[in-house]
Image: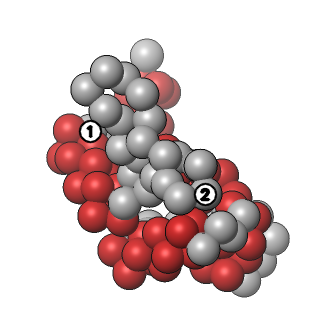
Amino acid sequence: MGKGVIIVRTLTLEDRRKIELMWGENASPVKIAAELGISQCTVYTELRRGQYVRVDGDVELDKNFRPAYNAERGETVYQRNLRNRGRRPKRGTEQKEEKQA
């Protein structure tokens, strides 16, 4: 691979379960990212996505007094967001529209 090539990989449910397991064992987001071969930012985003938020607005805490993470909830929220974002335009059509304007 050449310089500047970025490989985009979405997390699978199995990845999310591994995050849940490691997070429950008090692993740091940096360690989780290194283990899965993903960005730290991706781990933080996923931890936020799978949080439990109570009706009163407080975040549910786990045994380590950190926000609780659930892999199934993270997957559900990801799939819902994926459906809600709509269809993405093709790359070529965006550039043609800009040149015509």
Residue at screen point 25% across, 26% down: 55
Q: Residues under labels 2 and 1: Cα distance? A: 34 Å
**Name of the residue lying farthest toward the right:** 3
Q: Secondary structure at mark 2?
A: loop
Judge from the rendering whether residue 96 lies leftward or rightward of residue 35; answer left or right: left
> Tag 1, which secondary structure?
loop
Query: How far from the left and from the top, in percent, is residue 71?
Result: 36, 65
Residue that label 2 marks: 64
In the rendered view, tell whether residue 3 sits above or below residue 65.
below
Mark identifier at residue 85: 1
Which three-letter amino acid code belongs to the residue tagged 1?
Arg
Mark nearer the viewer, 2 or 1: 2
Q: Residue furthest front?
A: 63
Q: Earlier in the sequence, mark 2 or mark 1?
A: 2
Against 41, is 55 above or below? Answer: above
Q: Residue at image x 31%, y 21%? A: 56
Nearer-the-camera pick, 64 or 88: 64
- Percent position of residue 31, x then y: 74, 72
**Quadrant in the picture for the C terminus:** top left
Q: Quadrant of the N terminus?
A: bottom right
Q: Is residue 52 left or right of residue 86?
A: right
Q: Are marks 2 and 1 in contact (CB under 8 Å)?
A: no
